[in-house]
Amino acid sequence: MARHLVIGNGKMLLNLDNHCFIRDLYFPFVGQLNHVGGNMCRFGVWCDGAFSWLDDPEWSMTLGYIPESLVTNVIARNDRLGIELYLNDGLHQRECIYLKRVVVRNLGDSPKDIRVFFHHDLMIDGNEVGDTAAFYPDNRTIFHYKRSSYFMFNGQSEEGGIYQYSTGIKRFHSAEGTWRDAEDGELMGNAISQGSVDSTISFRTVVPPGNDKSIYYWMSVGSDIEEVKRLDQYVRDSHPEMLLSRVVIYWNHWLSRVGSRFADLPAEVVDQFKHSLLIVRTQIDERGAILAANDSDILQYNRDHYSYMWPRDGALIADAMSLAGFHGTIAPFFHFCARNLAPGGYLHHKYNPDGTVGSSWHPYVVNGVPRLPIQEDETALVLYALWKDYERHGEIELPQALYSSLVRKSASFLCDYIEPALGLPLPSYDLWEERYGIWTYTSSSVYAGLMGRHTLPICSEIMSEAMNTAQPRSGLKRGLSPTCGRKVPEGSLAA
């Protein structure tokens, strides 16, 4: 099931479910690593002796976002407790800081003693082995760490900072975790736990009848203790309310480049268009990878995920984002492809967010015959998207910078990878990643990529000869792939 609320900043991605529980936390790349992995980081309220986690059916939830931003806007109402919560979640636009505002409104006619609990069920670096959760007395925070991944949790209300805390063991022997300890409204204060661990912290406030109070909670993420301490101090010095407001302003400004002229499109369609741009932005790592999808639920059905960069998907998304006016947002994608282009000039099946080659089901040999395990349209569409971006925005600096590392090498490969009897690309896997052969879509993609010479004159020299002759370059033998040496029967359209 897709996550209901998604926030990101190009360095970090966080998914929340329909109960506002954190379910996925990716760092230091969007899509890599997942430090929660689908576990539930619970959020609950104790009110005058009664406790409830927000996944209890007694809560009515209204999910949404502040208009034209990546800051959530959620209303949660519990008539039994007589309270209403107004929730805003956001990631700082520059730093790896998660911010949450909880406004507690008293629906009753007498003051209410409120304690808000935040539970942290992390599996740092994707597993639960060797984690540590501890109380840090210097700044009165709870932090989790393993190797070079650190997570520091803090917050404040009018009454002060963390009210109570505890760390503990989870999912080992009979231990369920510290979230069970919270359900009586009290935390035992265990200062450190090691192994498969979790933690819970609480904040206290008293809300007058018909009034409301705000509680702020934040998580700082970094590579060492000094970095997360610095980020925690930054939130304290700036105040989380101010930082959340700046996040809204940032995304409002980011969206402004699409303008306001939408002809007679209904307002709800325009809103959906803008919201789609924001959601797409959350799936783009600032170092260039455009990820297919990021959530952990698919692990229940297949021991893999969609947190990969398929060059085809990335190119199509880059083309759409360029068309919407976001040239700067997608420029790193082309640099990513240039950095990770294979020596032979082609792009692999898919990539991890850090640029390493992703998992694949395309074999390197079939019936004893070597086979290049690629989908050729993925290489071609990157060229096509780059040329279309230049055609729209006229910024020659990007293709010029990529000419030797991406354009010339990939165009050379496309020109070489030709079945001479047909003048068509040699066989590769289709766009559905199922069949091997010569396909209309792949051939059209290659043609579109190579025809970019009309748009980028700097590329014409290498392409014009191949397009005019439709013969393999470099004196290759008839019917042989320059990379894998696979013989293709003359006149055959599929292998």
Image (cartoon, grey):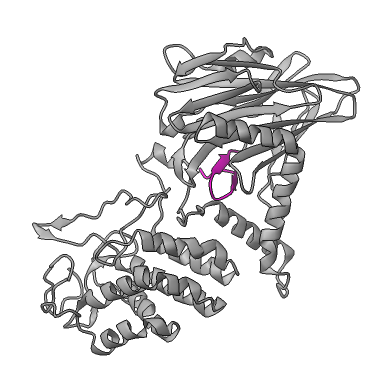
Res 377 quadrant in image: bottom left
Res 33 quadrant in image: top left
Seen in the image, is 488 located left or right of residue 92? left
| Residue 118 place in picture, x, y as percent | 64, 25
Quick check: 245 above or below 59?
A: below
Q: Which residue appears at 28% of the width and 67% of the height?
A: 345
So how many labels did they put on this image?
Answer: 0
* Foreground pick, 206 / 439: 206
Q: Which residue appears at 53% of the width and 17% of the height?
A: 177
| Residue 198 place in picture, x, y as percent | 52, 21
Q: Which residue appears at 67% of the width and 12% of the height?
A: 186
Seen in the image, is 260 located left or right of residue 19? right
Q: Can residue 22 be seen by looking at this rendering?
A: no
Seen in the image, is 206 located left or right of residue 22? right
Whether the magenta-drawn stretch holds residue 10 is answered as: yes
Q: Which residue appears at 67% of the width and 64% of the height?
A: 269
| Residue 465 place in picture, x, y as percent | 27, 87
Residue at the far left: name it.
368
Whether the magenta-drawn stretch holds residue 146 is answered as: no
* Foreground pick, 240 / 104: 240
* Foreground pick, 179 / 75: 179
Q: Which residues are magenta?
A: 1-17
Residue at the far bottom: name it.
468
Quick check: 207 above or below 390?
A: above
Quick check: 56 above or below 274?
A: above
| Residue 221 place in picture, x, y as percent | 56, 36
Q: Can residue 149 be seen by looking at this rendering?
A: yes
